[in-house]
């Protein structure tokens, strides 16, 4: 069996391609599988007797065919059937009462009117509808007379009289309901099988403000909000690229959350893009009320690793830069942050501030940040190791170590200090802004000073704990900072239990775990493993813009050169 395009040049008489099945079977309907027939099918030679080849349907149904019945169903074959619109106004209103709570929920509004002797109803959610647009539409329609409408009433409303920018016909009741609950307005005309969907939305939203986690000294001060349309517009403003694509997928049976997949069509790796789409479309969940974090957990298959496998950003310029490199960005409605896929460990240690300074200063800031991150991981475990095994210290570092012992064991002091820092961090989040400074003074002066004076802690524990906390807060990725804290606790416990072997074994296990991690089938420790010299240099040194001429190999972009053929020179 094979499939061929029937007609001249693979077209039917009406000019459209029409695939037909070519079956090898005899006149009694028995399939033939002789080798010569298979060879003819492979070579394209379709000449032969009528008893061998028939351009017709088989003598049995496709469902009974041993090959066709096992074929994969075409995409979209499992879609729900279209639910028709009620043709009577009373049935329409009754259905709204039964399904969406019309006359019970105060924000569900139906405005009944007659235009040209045609009964109509505008169905919308009170808090989402843009009343100025709908008022103008209704004002225009009030001038209609019965003679202004032809037999095709819906066509007249759509093409002549509904004065809104975005209006489409919708035949499906379920799609209409989802559109209205997403902010649109449905115009129902009695006796018509379709409704007109008017895109007149006014979502509650705040102004774009600089994100608190990604502040810069110089640069743009706008950040993402909870309204997806605002967010995609902020990125489009920076990327006036005709190849920029925004695809919408709705996720969640109840929430019907809009998820936008953003990419640059002639740069992104299409295989990776297809994999991301499949993962999102395969999600079976009742909803995503918590936004992008629930989407991450539903798409990224992970164990108990604390390290983040996706990157979040609240800055439009950061998202635009990553899209130009070949990443895929996921916008989730009601969420002021964007997921950037795929990601590596080293993506989480870079910040927009480095690219707002000169290459030399940017490189210096990057090294300082690397030092802070390394200190947040290894400073406390190493100091603890030198304290319990002083013979490991070189003579120049004799001053390192506790000068006197506290009343609590050293490992208990570390654990209490870690928990205390976490408590202060959570308290600062939940403390009103005017009181935050006072709380910081209480935490820094009273708690720390009194704990040392009473002998619960030694001075060095408080000092090195503070340095480690500063390194954690200097980590650009909030998720990576929390993961590093967990690894630091693991190292402290292993040092307390097994000393040097414990430190070495724990560090090795963590490194192996990082090497084995993959983010959407991309190695998490690239460019260190697998080693990529160009990638390593771009991480160590903040290169000038015109010197950074190629996109990362990790993303397998369709266009490797950022400035192909020097056309910008």
Image (cartoon, rainbow, N blue to C red):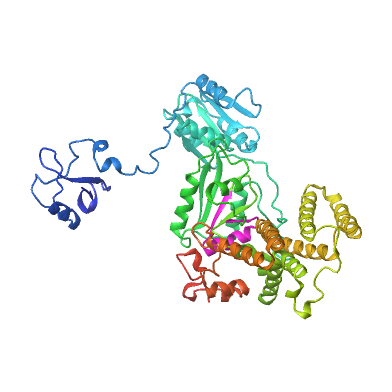
What is the x, y in percent for residue 313? 63, 56
Quadrant of the image occupied by residue 150? top left
Q: How many marks?
A: 0
What is the x, y in percent for residue 112? 58, 24
> Which residue is nearer to you in this view: 25 or 568?
25
Residue 313: in magenta span: yes
Quadrant of the image occupied by residue 461? bottom right
Q: Is residue 51 above or below residue 85?
A: below
Q: Is residue 200 above or below residue 231?
A: above
Residue plotted at (85% across, 64% down): 405
Quadrant of the image occupied by residue 483? bottom right
User: Which range is magenta?
Assistant: 308-331
Q: Is residue 142 visible?
A: no
Specify the farthest residue to the bottom.
395
Q: Is residue 442 visible?
A: yes
Residue 33: in magenta span: no
> Which residue is nearer to you in this view: 26 or 9?
26
What is the x, y in percent for residue 315? 65, 58
Residue plotted at (78% across, 47% down): 430
Q: Is residue 308 shown left or right of residue 466?
A: left
What is the x, y in percent for residue 376? 72, 64
> Which residue is nearer to you in this view: 429 or 195?
429
Residue plotted at (82% across, 75% down): 399
Q: Is residue 51 above or below residue 516?
A: above
Q: Is residue 38 shown left or right of residue 168?
A: left
């Amino acid at each position: 069996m094979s499939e061929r395009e029937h007609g001249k040049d693979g077209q039917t008489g009406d000019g459209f391609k029409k695939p037909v099945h070519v079956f090898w079977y005899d006149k009694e309907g028995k399939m033939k599988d002789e080798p010569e027939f298979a060879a003819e099918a492979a070579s394209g030679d379709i000449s032969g007797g009528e008893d061998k080849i028939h351009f017709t349907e088989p003598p049995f149904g496709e469902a009974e065919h041993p090959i066709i019945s096992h074929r994969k169903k075409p995409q979209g074959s499992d879609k729900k059937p279209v639910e028709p619109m009620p043709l009577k106004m009373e049935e329409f209103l009754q259905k709204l009462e039964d399904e969406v709570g019309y006359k019970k929920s105060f924000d569900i509004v139906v405005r009944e009117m007659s235009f040209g002797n045609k009964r109509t109803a505008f169905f919308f959610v009170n808090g989402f509808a843009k009343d100025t647009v709908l008022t103008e539409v209704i004002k225009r329609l009030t001038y209609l007379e019965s003679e202004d409408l032809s037999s095709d009433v819906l066509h007249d409303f759509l093409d002549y009289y509904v004065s809104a920018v975005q209006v489409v016909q919708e035949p499906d009741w379920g799609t209409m309901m989802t559109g209205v609950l997403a902010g649109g307005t449905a115009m129902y005309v009695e006796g018509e099988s379709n409704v007109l969907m008017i895109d007149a939305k006014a979502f509650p939203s705040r102004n774009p403000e600089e994100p608190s986690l990604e502040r810069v000294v110089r640069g743009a001060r706008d950040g993402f909000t909870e309204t997806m349309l605002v967010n995609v517009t902020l990125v489009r403003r920076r990327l006036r690229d005709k190849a920029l694509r925004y695809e919408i997928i709705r996720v969640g049976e109840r929430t019907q959350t809009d998820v936008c997949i953003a990419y640059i069509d002639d740069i992104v790796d299409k295989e990776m893009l297809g994999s991301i789409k499949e993962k999102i479309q395969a999600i079976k969940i009742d909803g995503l009320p918590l936004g992008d974090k629930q989407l991450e957990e539903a798409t990224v298959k992970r164990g108990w690793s604390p390290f983040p496998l996706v990157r979040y950003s609240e800055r439009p310029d950061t998202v635009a830069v990553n899209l130009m490199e070949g990443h895929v960005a996921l916008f989730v409605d009601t969420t002021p942050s964007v997921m950037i896929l795929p990601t590596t460990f080293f993506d989480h240690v870079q910040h927009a501030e480095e690219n707002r300074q000169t290459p030399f200063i940017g490189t210096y800031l990057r090294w300082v940040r690397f030092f802070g991150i390394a200190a947040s991981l290894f400073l406390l475990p190493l100091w603890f190791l030198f304290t319990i095994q002083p013979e490991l210290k070189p003579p120049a570092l004799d001053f390192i170590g506790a000068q006197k012992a506290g009343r609590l064991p050293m490992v208990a002091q570390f654990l209490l200090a870690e928990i205390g820092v976490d408590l202060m961090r959570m308290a600062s989040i939940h403390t009103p802004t005017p009181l935050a400074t006072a709380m910081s003074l209480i935490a820094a002066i009273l708690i720390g000073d009194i704990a040392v004076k009473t002998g619960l802690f030694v001075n060095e524990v408080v000092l090195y704990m503070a340095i480690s906390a500063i390194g954690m807060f200097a980590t650009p990725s909030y998720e990576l900072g929390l993961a590093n804290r967990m690894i630091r606790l693991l190292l402290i416990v292993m040092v307390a239990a097994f000393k040097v072997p414990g430190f070495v074994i724990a560090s090795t296990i963590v490194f192996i775990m990082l090497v084995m991690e993959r983010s959407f089938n991309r190695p998490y420790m690239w460019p260190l493993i697998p080693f990529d010299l160009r990638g390593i240099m771009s991480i160590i040194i903040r290169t000038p813009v015109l010197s950074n001429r190629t996109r990362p190999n990790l993303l397998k972009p369709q266009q490797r050169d950022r400035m192909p053929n020097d056309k910008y020179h």
